[in-house]
Amino acid sequence: MVALVGGTFLGFAAAAGAAERPWSVRAADAAMEHWPDGRVAAAGTPVAWNHDQATVLLGLDAVWLNTVDARYFNYMKKSVDGLVGADGSLATYEPGKNRLLDLQLGRELLRMYGVTQNVRYYKAATVLYQHLATQPRTASGGFWPSQGTPNQMWIDGLHEAEPFYAEYAATFHHPEAFADITKQFELVDGHARDKKTGLLRQGWDEAKQERWADKQTGDSAENWGRGMGWTLMALVDVLPFYPSYDSGRKELLEMLTRDAAAVARVQDAKTGVWWEVLDKAGAKGNYEEASASCMFVYALAKGVRLGYLPASYMVDAERGYKGILKEFVKADGEGFKLTGTVGATDLGGVPYKDGSYGFYTGVKTVTDDAKGLGAFMLASTEMENAKNARLGRGETVMMDAWFNSQMRADATGKQIYFHYKWDDQAASGYSLLGHIFENFGAELKTLYVAPTAENLRDAQVYIVASPDIPAKNPKPHYADAEDAREIAKWVHDGGVLLMMENDTSFADLDHFNLVSEKYGIHFNSILRKHVEGTNWAQGKIDVAAGGPVFHEAHTLYVKDVCTITATAPAKAILTEGGDVFMAVAHYGKGTVYAFVDPWLYNEYTDGRKLPATYDNYAGGVEFVRWALEQVSRGTAGAGAAPGDKSVKH
């Protein structure tokens, strides 16, 4: 082990060692204790494909991504597997009822497919996606909430359907779907908005025939909190999947801006939370409501983190979260309960729900309601991320897909890029590394052509991992002297280059040394840390606290690595037994980092394989913080060349 020098870190590793567990973790553990068998339903009731289960799993998914605690993933998988047959069939799903709320659970099918690559999850998700083609619509093209709600749109339905619709379309090559997704938001935005408050009414009846519908506008009468919460969540959950070139993206950002402003205006000045009927704070019978408050905090904080909303909205999110903890969270020691969530709230039906003020305020609140707990977990993960998100805001992290351009067929048969890629959620991917960068506020992009100073111009960080050899890619793109010169120009102007090599049986060292030697870094064709089977200790690297990259001590895992020879301007910063494993160089205004393994791919960060001794993910959080701290702001990354088709956004 080598003692390293310098650095500060206040992220995941420090939080994990705190005396009190994060609120997101406490809520997640409470949810699993409340529903231990993975069925989010009352005791004694049959297993069911339902909306409540979907909301809890969305919350657990967010907690898993932040903690890489395998308990959460395993719970989600058990929950989904109880409803999905080996052939992709969906137990208890009733397509004839045309319920939009059945689509929300489809997002967990996509997660399970992404991580496991098991085609049965793809088949199950495709059942839901194909059903959208036959979902009944209003005359204007808006989805009915269900078979029993003709000619109507409910704002709840935006979150039930559109995030799944968008993620499936982005994952399985349906760019044409985004026009329809945009239309669903446009119809609600154009017809359900209260012109006085800017808030959205829960329902819009295009035929203006329902008893709850205004005869002139078709809108229901009141501004219901959770309905507005679902809408803001839908916007921030859909936008990450929109292609940058799609005109609908700009429209949705404008909608989010309007909705966020309207919601901020009705935040309670005293408590920081929001009311059941949003614009009637303090009115007789009205009450402060937990699930809407959690949804608003989540959407505002995520909108700021991803750059969709101005940073000023974090003031509203922080005030709202403090209010949630004070007004709704009941904690006794390690116990946890969430009070104040309004029960199920819809329109029409039997007995008839007329959407009046008395109807909304007459619905009783519930403790540990699934929708409230799920929303609280989402809000908590965003607020726990918020302390880091300022560092990378406005920065772009570019992943190489040229030197490593491996492809495989996905479930549709289409060839896609994988192996150390942002979109690859399987063991081979860098999706969790991407999640860490996004938690720090950075934007992710991928470069599919040879790097030049020009096409790296909008990137502050550029990552190259394990350049291909013929055994891994029949047509490798070997680095040459021109590549080395172009990358060096970009680094010299302030770019941060992160090189993560591999051993020679997996990666090219000889050609890529043309790039690395510009900075005094030579990757040696020497095998170290060879691991036999599950003899994990053979790949162990102990990292001491107090170094330039790692402030905290870590136990990292690598497997079959090369070594580095470092000469000026490079300096070795991690050695073991005379072998150099990590080096850093300053070159012009830029910084170069080199490691002997692509150590942050999902297989060794997602918590599902390695013993708990190894903390690659926590080390990755520190590494990402360090990398973003190296960025020379205002130098590298002046902006992408207009119309550059080689860069994926």
Image (spheres, grey):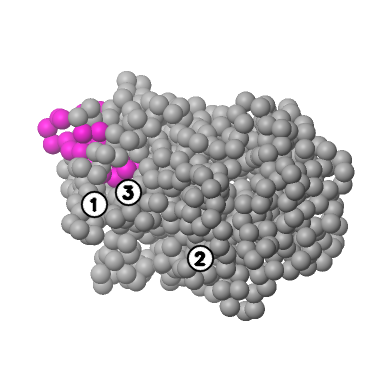
Q: Is residue 465 magenta?
A: no
**Residue 275, magenta (yes or no):** yes
Residue 188 in the image, given as x and y percentages of width and height: 44, 33
At x 28% / y 27%, what residue is drawn? 266
Q: Residue at x 20, y 42 (%)?
A: 326
Q: Secondary structure at mark 1?
A: strand
The answer to whether 341 appears left or right of 383 in the picture is left
- Disc 2 residue type (three-letter): Tyr
State the residue at coordinates (67%, 48%): 571
- Please tell me whether mark 3 sits on a helix, a strand or a loop: helix
User: Would residue 368 be seen by someone viewing this image from the given angle?
Assistant: yes
For this rendering, which residue is in front, 236 or 271? 271
Q: Position of residue 405 (x, y in %)?
A: 76, 54
Q: Amino acid at mark 1?
A: Leu
Question: Where is the C terminus found, in terms of image quarters?
Answer: top right
Residue 28 lies, with reference to residue 530, above or below; the image says above
Mark 3 neighbour density, 10 Å: few (under 14) some (14–19) many (20 or more): many
Task: Please tell me which residue lies in front, 42 or 78.
Answer: 78
With 363 as the anchor, is 50 left or right in this view? right
Q: Secondary structure at mark 2?
A: loop
Asked where in the image residue 385 lies, by quadrant, the reply is top left
Q: Which residue type carries mark 3? A: Phe
Q: Residue 376: give its label.
A: 3
Asked whether 434 or 582 is in front, the reply is 582
Q: What residue did someone put label 1 on?
A: 338
Q: Nearer the viewer, mark 2 or mark 1?
A: 2
Is the Cβ of the residue at disc 3 closer than 8 Å to that at disc 1? yes
Q: Which residue lies under the disc numbered 2?
A: 614
Q: Which mark is residue 92?
A: none
The span shown in magenta is 271-295
